[in-house]
Amino acid sequence: MAATILDGRELGRTIEKDLMSRIDNLKGRGLHPHLAVVIVGDDPASHVYVRNKEMACERCGIKSTRIDLDSSVTEIEILKVVEMLNLDDSVNGILVQSPLPKGIDESLIIDAINPQKDVDGFHNVNLGKLVQGNTSGLLPCTPAGIMKILEFSDFETSGKNALVIGRSRIVGMPLSILLAQRGIDATVTIAHSRTKNLAEICRQADLVVAAIGRAEFVKPEWIKPGAMVIDVGINRIPDSTRKSGSRLTGDVDPDVMDIAGWMTPVPGGVGPMTIAMLMSNTVMGTELFSNI
Ligand code: NDP
């Protein structure tokens, strides 16, 4: 039987709609949630991501400001822009789009953001709170979006075997912590490029999250029938049938659909949820920390 498709676009729009009344409320108090996005260089994928974030702000009624910096910019110049945004009381959220050009220390830039404006949830302070079991603050958007997908599905996480493939600071690691937290109670295994017998480990999992960055890597024969499969990957692969000559695909082979119980599509699964959670963090940051 084919898997139930978990439509992140629809759920993301529902979350955005729910935010609108909170945004109206804030506006009534003279507070207009405001997201500042810093983008460095001309990486086409980054420009698409930033445009999607700006469009989400427009849909929700969040003010957005975009700061374009040339790829030749220095670390000190980026830090100065971050400091300016930190000091600007009208700005509630700051996002520095990844990846930054070679030679720029991304962690240094992220940790220069005021943690109360760190709407990506990547600052040491916000990740530290998460490790301490405090999930009430600004959580990383992709893991938070995945948790919402699980919450809105009829999948029960408690006591289930969860396999997270990928241990990045922005997806795999924080998601593993969220899945293992009290109340969610999954038994979590984290896999990475040095993991042995991945297919075998995967076959034991009731929930598989693929955050690897390798096109259609997870195969149908790795999946336990009826499992929940969350595909985080965004990979562009050649496709001669398309006018553009390429298309987007995830880290999971689409044939997994015939084995899994639930599955997120790519595109239209985790991606829109990541953006919805960015909007949610911007609103939460305004509610909790606004100085105006
Ligand atoms: P990273 O490159 O930071 O991490 C990839 C992880 O995959 C690493 O932990 C790596 O292991 C692991 N890995 C690589 N090869 C293998 C392998 N053969 N077997 C097992 N594990 C492997 O990627 P991100 O976490 O930033 O992103 C992952 C994917 O998700 C990308 O496609 C990215 O575009 C996408 N993404 C999508 C988002 C969305 O909103 N939908 C948001 C963020 C990312 P090791 O640590 O050993 O190197």
Image (spheres, rainbow, N blue to C red):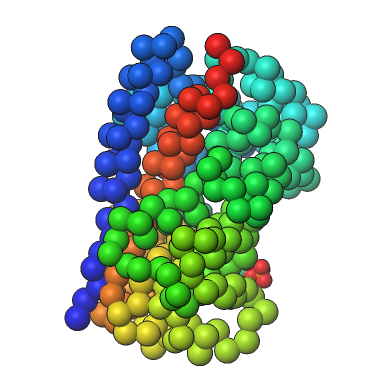
In which quadrant is the C terminus drawn?
A: top right
Is 156 on the left or on the right of 78, as rendered?
Answer: left
Pinpoint residue 155: horizontal percent, then vertical percent.
32, 67
Residue in front for this viewpoint, 292 or 80: 292
The single residue placed furthest to the left in the displayed view is 1
Rendering quarter of residue 56: top left
- Residue at horizontal 40 percent and vertical 18 percent from the top: 26
Determine whether 147 is above or below 24 in the image. below
User: In this view of the protein, can residue 8 be seen by the observer?
Assistant: yes
Residue in front for this viewpoint, 21 or 225: 21
Pinpoint residue 12: horizontal percent, then vertical percent.
32, 45
- Residue at horizontal 59 percent and vertical 15 percent from the top: 291
Is 75 on the left or on the right of 22, as rendered?
Answer: right
In which quadrant is the N terminus drawn?
A: bottom left
Q: In which of the image's four quarters is ligand 1 placed?
A: bottom right
- Residue at horizontal 76 percent and vertical 44 percent from the top: 105
Rendering quarter of residue 198: bottom right
